[in-house]
Image (spheres, helix red, strand yellow):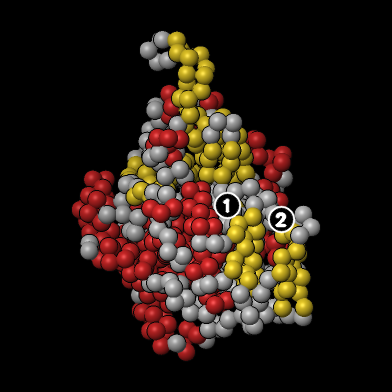
């Protein structure tokens, strides 16, 4: 494995997102002096927060899988969840899915619970099919995780030069993992709507299930078989805990510090310059900025990248007297439209051909149903359902996510379009039984592709480059920067890719590029433990 050239005692990490914090923890554990610079006033990056007048809400990812990767990063400096005050709860169901005819099903990671749920709604034959599908997904994940996701590549030829990687590659070929994910899941599952539950995750990789390779079965495996978790206090609690572990171990994190440039001598970075006029000397730099923002630091990004679809996300609060009448009570609800394949054709289209969903499939997130400390009591006079005058109204935080095309696929005027499109989405939900959402959802933050573009994200998407074959694995943007001896990339735009588990791995892989073998880290623990749990069933 190639590593940065020359000394690497002092490392500056640009960005306190999960990849930057993971890199910093692994580097600190390896004895480096680490300074993390973050332009926001809090850690988390895309796993950040929005502040309302009397509440906070996650501003990015709300789905946590493979929490062992957090443990691994903390363990690099001798910390544990307990030592940094992080509590992570398993969620059952991980999702509640609802279909266009009003029927629904819970998604459980426990195989017996999931089989029972499928038997309830579709019968024992489909439950048997589910177990076969689960076994196939497990085998794909096992072959892929250690040798492709959790591994640095110096060249695509590593897949055949390295004996273990070659063996894993042969296994994936035998499994049919280089065919298409959606059709494979459909054949194994049989029922089209149930198949959606184990293939919609391809969207996380920027692809439709119909187009995504079967190797991306690792994503629904993590999602539906290894379990979805919730960190108490919200996803932002993970970044806060990692920050505490880092600073207690001697690392430095500076917030509200924007990096405006990297000084270099020849091929080597020598210092990092900040907007407040300071210069920090360094021996190596980890850059976690979005792949669309690398030019800010004098770095070239790969041309011709195809971006993932984007999203419109509304954050706010709603009275619980409204939500208690809704047809679904779940932390995560996926409300599917009828036209499933057309949805992906619309939002994942090629350049200039994208359109908004004609029959939306939407994600509603209600974290207070898991964490009651997130409820908000507001002093408001109100007549309750029993006809009594009350002085306090209880609200819950609510996020609504609607996938949409990125700005390359559909260069829409979101300043003009956003308010009317949001009204349209709320009216769709109203018709589907979420009564009162269009009148009572108080929206404090609305993110659109323009939001993401203003933050420097590729084509206005928070999901970075799509995982086309030519943009995945050893073909993805490398974490070693060509023409720079001591600058390394981390984050969703580089290896291994998009998602909370993968960006945590990305930080570790970036650290390995600087220090070589991470002997302080038990690199296989999260994978081994997760698979052991799965194999019990």
Q: Nearer the viewer, residue 80 or 42?
A: 80
Estimate the x, y position of residue 447 in percent, counting from the top left: 62, 44
- Of labels 1 and 2, earlier in sequence is 1
Residue pointed to by mark 2: 258
Judged from the image, the secondary structure of the residue bearing numbered disc 2 is loop
Would residue 485 be visible to someone looking at this image?
Answer: yes
The Cα–Cα distance between marks 1 and 2, rounded to whole angstroms, is: 13 Å
Spot occupied by residue 254 in the image (x, y as percentages of width and height): 64, 55
Q: Residue at x 42, y 15 (%)?
A: 384
Under circle 1, the secondary element is: loop
Residue named by callout 1:
43
Q: Is residue 418 above or below residue 78?
A: above
Q: Is residue 532 above or below residue 197?
A: below
Mark 2 burial class by Cα count in 10 Å: few <14, some 14-19, many 20+: some
Q: Residue furthest left?
A: 124
Asked where in the image residue 416 lies, by quadrant, the reply is top right
Left or right: where 359 falls relative to 408 = left
> How far across and how far down the image is residue 125, in percent?
22, 56
164 with respect to 273 (left or right) = left
Observer-nearest residue: 201 or 71?
71
């Amino acid at each position: 494995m190639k590593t940065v050239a020359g000394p690497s005692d002092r490392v500056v990490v640009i960005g306190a997102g999960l990849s930057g914090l993971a890199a910093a923890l692994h580097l600190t554990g390896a004895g480096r002096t680490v300074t993390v610079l973050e332009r926001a006033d809090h850690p988390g990056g895309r796993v950040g927060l929005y502040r309302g007048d009397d509440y906070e809400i996650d501003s990015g990812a709300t789905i946590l899988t493979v929490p062992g990767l957090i443990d691994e990063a903390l363990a690099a400096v001798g910390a544990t969840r307990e030592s940094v005050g992080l509590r992570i709860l398993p969620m059952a169901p991980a999702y509640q899915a609802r279909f266009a005819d009003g029927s629904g099903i819970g998604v459980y990671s426990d195989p017996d619970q999931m089989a029972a749920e499928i038997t309830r709604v579709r019968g024992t034959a489909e439950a048997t099919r589910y177990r076969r599908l689960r076994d196939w997904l497990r085998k794909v994940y096992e072959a892929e995780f250690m040798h492709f996701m959790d591994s640095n590549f110096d060249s695509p030829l590593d897949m055949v030069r390295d004996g273990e990687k070659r063996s894993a590659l042969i296994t994936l070929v035998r499994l049919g993992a280089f065919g298409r994910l959606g059709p494979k899941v459909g054949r194994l599952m049989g029922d089209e709507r149930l198949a959606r539950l184990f293939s919609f995750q391809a969207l996380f990789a920027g692809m439709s299930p119909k187009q995504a390779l079967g190797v991306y079965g690792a994503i629904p495996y993590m999602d539906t078989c290894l379990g979805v978790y919730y960190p108490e206090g919200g996803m932002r609690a993970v970044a806060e805990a990692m920050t505490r572990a880092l600073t207690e171990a001697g690392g430095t994190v500076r917030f509200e510090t924007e990096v405006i440039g990297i000084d270099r001598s020849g091929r080597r970075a020598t210092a990092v310059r900040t907007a407040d006029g300071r210069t920090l000397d360094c021996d190596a730099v980890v850059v976690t900025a979005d792949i669309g923002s690398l030019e800010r630091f004098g770095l070239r990004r790969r041309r011709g990248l195809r971006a993932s679809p984007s999203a419109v996300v509304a954050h706010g609060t709603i009275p619980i007297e409204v939500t208690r009448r809704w047809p679904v009570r779940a932390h995560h609800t996926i409300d599917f439209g009828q036209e499933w394949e057309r949805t992906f054709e619309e939002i994942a289209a090629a350049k200039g051909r994208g359109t908004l969903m004609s029959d939306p499939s939407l994600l509603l997130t209600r974290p207070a149903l898991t964490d009651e400390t997130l409820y908000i009591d507001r002093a408001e006079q109100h007549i309750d359902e029993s006809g009594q005058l009350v002085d306090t109204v209880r609200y819950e935080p609510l996020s609504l996510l609607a996938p949409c095309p990125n700005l390359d696929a559909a260069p829409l005027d979101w300043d003009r379009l956003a308010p009317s499109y949001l009204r349209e989405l709320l009216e769709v939900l109203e018709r589907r039984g979420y009564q009162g959402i269009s009148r009572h959802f108080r929206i404090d933050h609305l993110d659109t592709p323009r939001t993401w573009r203003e933050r420097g994200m590729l084509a206005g998407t928070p999901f970075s480059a799509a995982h086309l074959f030519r943009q995945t694995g050893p073909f993805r943007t490398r974490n070693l920067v060509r023409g720079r001896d001591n600058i390394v990339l981390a984050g969703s735009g580089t290896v291994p890719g998009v998602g909370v588990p993968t960006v945590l791995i990305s930080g570790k892989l970036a650290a390995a590029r600087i220090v070589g073998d991470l002997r302080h880290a038990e690199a296989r623990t999260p994978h081994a433990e997760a698979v052991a749990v799965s194999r019990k069933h």
